[in-house]
Image (cartoon, rainbow, N blue to C red):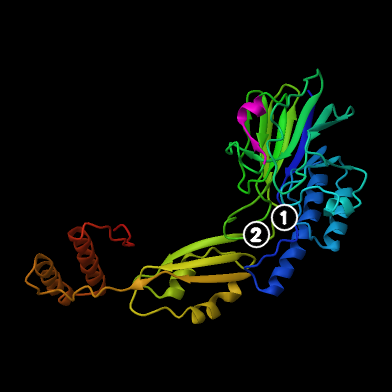
């Protein structure tokens, strides 16, 4: 039984602005983005893939740098396999787009029309179909299309679009019914930046890989590309590989009753120096946090760090003790136990009990960090 091994990625968004970073680091990140291409070519060779599918938005806009086009061509030529590109809404094809200026190597086929076209590779036993965005918006490209299934021939489709999007979506809405009726064995999609995993509609397998490296705090965590193996019997398998240099991460730290710097260090993973972090501080504090001091003490642990202060002023726990109310009587009793407690552990337990009790009286939750005995 023969198999076809495919490398599938999308949404590199080369030459992104990285507006949230300082100018110097933004420039460095654009250079590092180009290095993604080299790692992609290396992966293609190491995995001995037979087909590379790049499902749109390789470029972030129509103002890409000359160096990016040069590096793109060099790396595509080094992939040692046929490469298909389906331009998306950010890098749509037009006579004035970067795609019209870039001299792509001979192993690369760029789809340039909004109508789906196909190209046959008899040596691989495949026919690859695809289409392009030809402006920033696109209606449904797959609608009404069905390819003929031929014995011994696998049908592959590459598109930039949204599965399950409303019919009036301007980004090539695609339905699972259309995928099932497409006559395809595998459909390689782009546009959505969170990976889908392997899915199936009828006899058609499909996926979108998400972006291979995050560019902001809406693209956090590990990002990967897809390695797809398609067998003659219709079986499909998907593995992921990471080629990213940096990650974006959000971390929330409750600093109630704790030193903020120590609380952050306690929750940080061992390796963060290559990554971009946004740390949000929550909880109750006695005085406003000094974010400048915290940043100065933490900055060297990250490629870039953002701090957010979402703490609230600490409530004086015992200020109503002694009032002629249920709350006052409750606090008066616990305050007596707090003042006569033999050690700090007991005092913390009494304070916690007081907070829980007040939360119950106010019919609200009291978030308390505690350990099992």
The residue lying furthest to the left in this view is: 324
176 within the magenta span: yes
> Which structural element holds mark 1?
loop
114 within the magenta span: no
The image position of residue 160, as x and y in percent, is 71, 42
Corner quadrant of residue 219: bottom right
Q: Is residue 343 above or below residue 15?
A: below
Question: What residue would you read off at disc 1?
Answer: 13
> Which structural element holds mark 2?
loop
> Dot 2, how many residues are within 10 Å of its Cα: few (below 14), some (14-19), or many (20+)?
many
Corner quadrant of residue 355: bottom left
Q: Is residue 2 above or below residue 99?
A: above
Alpha carbon separation for disc pair 1 and 2 = 9 Å
Q: Is residue 179 above or below residue 344?
A: above
Whether residue 19 is visible: yes
User: Depth check: 126 or 345 in front?
Assistant: 126
Is 323 left, or right, of 359 in this rendering? Answer: left
Is 73 left, or right, of 92 in this rendering? Answer: right
Stretch in magenta: 172-180
Q: Residue at x 63, y 23 (%)?
A: 202
Corner quadrant of residue 17: bottom right
Is 125 left, or right, of 90 in this rendering? Answer: right
Count every numbered label the image shows and give the total: 2
> Dot 1, how many residues are within 10 Å of its Cα: few (below 14), some (14-19), or many (20+)?
many
The image position of residue 60, as x and y in percent, is 73, 56
The image quadrant where one finds the N terminus is top right
User: Depth check: 115 or 267 in front?
Assistant: 115
Question: What residue would you read off at disc 2?
Answer: 215
């Amino acid at each position: 039984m023969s198999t076809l091994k495919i490398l599938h990625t999308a949404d590199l968004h080369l030459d992104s602005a990285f507006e949230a970073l300082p100018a110097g680091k933004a420039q460095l990140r654009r250079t590092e983005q180009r290095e993604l291409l080299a790692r992609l070519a290396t992966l293609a060779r190491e995995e001995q893939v037979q087909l590379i599918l790049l499902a749109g938005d390789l470029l972030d806009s129509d103002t890409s740098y000359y160096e990016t086009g040069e590096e793109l061509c060099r790396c595509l030529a080094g992939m040692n396999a046929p490469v298909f590109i389906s331009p998306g809404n950010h890098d749509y094809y037009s006579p004035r787009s970067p795609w019209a200026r870039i001299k792509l190597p001979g192993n690369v086929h760029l789809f340039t029309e909004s109508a789906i076209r196909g190209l046959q590779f008899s040596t691989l036993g495949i026919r690859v179909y695809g289409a392009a965005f030809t402006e920033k918006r696109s209606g449904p490209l797959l609608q009404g299309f069905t390819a003929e299934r031929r014995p011994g021939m696998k049908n592959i489709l590459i598109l930039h679009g949204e599965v399950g999007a409303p019919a009036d979506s301007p980004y090539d809405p695609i339905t699972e019914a259309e995928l099932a009726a497409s006559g395809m064995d595998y459909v390689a999609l782009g546009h959505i930046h969170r990976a889908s995993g392997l899915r199936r509609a009828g006899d058609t397998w499909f996926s979108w890989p998400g972006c291979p490296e995050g560019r902001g705090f809406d693209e956090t965590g590990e990002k990967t590309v897809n390695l797809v193996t398609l067998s003659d019997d219709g079986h499909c398998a998907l593995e992921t590989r990471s080629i990213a240099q940096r990650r974006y991460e959000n971390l929330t730290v409750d600093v109630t009753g704790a030193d903020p710097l120590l609380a952050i260090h306690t929750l940080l993973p061992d390796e963060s120096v290559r990554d971009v972090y946004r740390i949000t501080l929550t909880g109750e504090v006695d005085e406003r946090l000094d974010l400048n001091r915290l940043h100065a003490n933490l900055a060297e642990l990250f490629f870039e760090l953002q701090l957010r202060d979402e703490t609230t002023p600490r409530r004086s726990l015992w200020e109503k003790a002694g009032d002629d109310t249920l709350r006052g009587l409750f606090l008066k009793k616990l305050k007596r136990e707090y003042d006569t407690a033999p050690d700090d552990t007991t005092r913390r337990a009494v304070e916690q009990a007081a907070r829980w009790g007040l939360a119950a009286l106010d019919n609200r939750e009291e978030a308390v960090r505690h350990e099992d005995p």
